Image: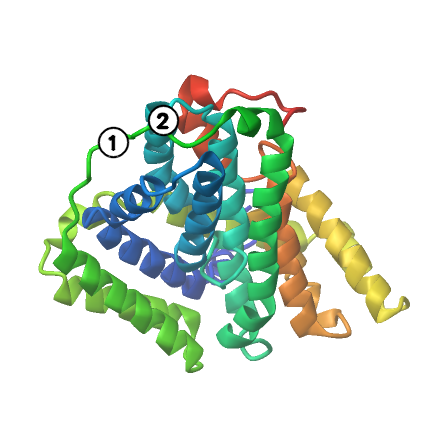
């Protein structure tokens, strides 16, 4: 963008939203300490090995992955839980595919509940400050997430009804009990609660997240190098580059006209929101939800009810990830990580 003269260097640097980068970094650090404590593996093991039937196992996976994704980035949850879900399914002699799809789709759905559940919600939450606070969004999105998770479990059970008919009580599972560093997990969870508390009190999402992460580094009593080495630094660089790219693209007059059409002031409020939601679902699957959200955010303040626009953008762009196999990074992480057990055709998905 700079080399071809679309942006000068100063404008390119200003385009990088450091508050979003700080928010994402803070959540990643908190998730890194929970991973270091083996919290995800232990939690999944505890839930999944206590399910008496295949249906109970499905519902446990749906709500465990969904609610964990509401607190931390859903991609991290999928990365941590995929091997254990697969191990439990294989050990119990169950078809793995229904449970793997449940993990991927539920982590997408659960991520809609909070502003920190996925990268696109972080973008929206940062942009919505002053219009929609953390608690305000949570109250509106919680019913969407909970109803969505329940509907997801019912739908998957119906789609795989032949498999579930053949599954009775689960066989004994000999999945070894994973180690849990209780002290480190307790401190990391306390810092995560601090982040939620600060955000709920009206502090900026970036400030709440990075403050809680800094506190975790201080109280964890674990060398931070071990955690920092496992962070996805390339994701932060991706966001920085994406901010510059979108700034350049949206400076083109044709793109500005397209953005204006997303919030046509001549339609009714309901019609505008419906059109905006439909465009979000389509756009999120054409260009991926994160870059689409970056572009669409510029149109939200022009809607009749910007607060409703932010909620709609978050819900539609997040849930759109379940429409296609490649609509969400979480889908790819789970299905690729499961190897032959995660093989499914594009149209069947």
> Of 150 and 188, which appears nearest the observer?
150
Relative vertical location of residue 2 with respect to residue 168 in this rendering, above or below: below
Q: Name the residue at the right extreme.
A: 266
Please give the name of the residue rendered at 44% of the width and 55% of the height, measured from the top-left corner: 67
Badge 1: few (under 14), some or many (20 or more) residues near its Cα, within 10 Å? Answer: some
Mark 2–mark 1 CB contact (< 8 Å): no
Please give the name of the residue rendered at 28% of the width and 46% of the height, measured from the top-left corner: 46
Badge 2: few (under 14), some or many (20 or more) residues near its Cα, within 10 Å? Answer: some
Q: Which secondary structure lies at badge 1?
A: loop
| Residue 108 visible in image | yes
Residue 138 horizontal side relative to residue 28, left or right: right
Q: Name the residue at the bottom extreme.
A: 201
x and y percentages locating residue 282 in the rendered image: 72, 44
Please give the name of the residue rendered at 21% of the width and 46% of the height, measured from the top-left corner: 38
x and y percentages locating residue 154 in the rendered image: 61, 43
Give the colouring mode of the picture: rainbow
Q: Which secondary structure lies at badge 2?
A: loop
x and y percentages locating residue 177 in the rendered image: 19, 38
| Residue 288 visible in image | no
> Of 20 and 219, which appears nearest the observer?
219
Q: CA distance from mark 2 to mark 1?
A: 9 Å
Q: Which residue is mark 2?
A: 92
Numbered tag placed on residue 323 in the rendering: none
Relative vertical location of residue 290 with respect to residue 329 in this rendering, above or below: below
Q: Name the residue at the front extreme.
A: 169
> Of 97 and 94, which appears nearest the observer?
94
Relative vertical location of residue 9 with respect to residue 331 in this rendering, above or below: below
What is the quadrant of residue 323 in the picture?
A: top right
Mark 2 or mark 1, which has the lower sequence index? 2
Residue 67 horizontal side relative to residue 213, left or right: right
Numbered tag placed on residue 175 in the rendering: 1
Quarter of the image that includes the C terminus: top right
């Amino acid at each position: 963008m700079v080399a071809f003269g679309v942006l000068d260097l100063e404008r390119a640097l200003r385009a990088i939203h450091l508050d979003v980068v700080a928010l994402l970094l803070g959540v990643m650090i908190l998730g890194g300490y929970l991973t270091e404590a083996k919290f995800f593996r232990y939690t999944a093991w505890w839930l999944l090995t206590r399910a008496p039937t295949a249906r109970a196992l499905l519902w446990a996976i749906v709500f465990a992955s969904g609610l964990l994704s509401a607190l931390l980035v859903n991609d991290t949850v999928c990365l941590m839980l995929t091997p254990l879900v697969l191990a439990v399914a294989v050990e119990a002699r169950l078809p793995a595919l229904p449970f793997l799809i449940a993990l991927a789709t539920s982590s997408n759905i659960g991520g809609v509940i909070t502003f920190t559940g996925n990268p696109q919600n972080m973008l929206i939450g940062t942009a919505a400050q002053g219009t929609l606070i953390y608690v305000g969004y949570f109250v509106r999105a919680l019913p969407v997430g909970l109803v969505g998770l329940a509907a997801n479990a019912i739908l998957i059970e119906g789609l795989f009804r032949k498999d579930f008919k053949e599954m009775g009580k689960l066989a004994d599972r000999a999945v070894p009990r994973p180690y849990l560093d209780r002290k480190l997990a307790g401190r990391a969870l306390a810092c995560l609660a601090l982040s939620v508390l600060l955000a709920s009190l009206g502090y900026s999402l970036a400030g709440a997240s990075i403050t809680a992460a800094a506190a975790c580094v201080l109280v964890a009593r674990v060398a931070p190098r071990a955690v920092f080495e496992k962070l996805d630094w390339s994701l932060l660089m991706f966001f920085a580059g994406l901010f510059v790219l979108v700034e350049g693209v949206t400076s083109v007059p044709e793109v500005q006209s397209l953005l204006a059409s997303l919030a046509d002031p001549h339609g009714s409020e309901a019609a505008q929101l419906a059109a905006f939601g439909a465009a979000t679902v389509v756009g999120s699957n054409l260009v991926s939800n994160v870059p689409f959200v970056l572009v669409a955010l510029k149109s939200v303040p022009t809607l009749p009810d910007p607060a409703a626009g932010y909620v709609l953008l978050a819900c539609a762009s997040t849930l759109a990830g379940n429409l296609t196999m490649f609509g969400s990074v979480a889908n790819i992480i789970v299905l690729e990580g499961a190897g032959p057990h995660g093989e499914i055709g594009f149209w069947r998905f």
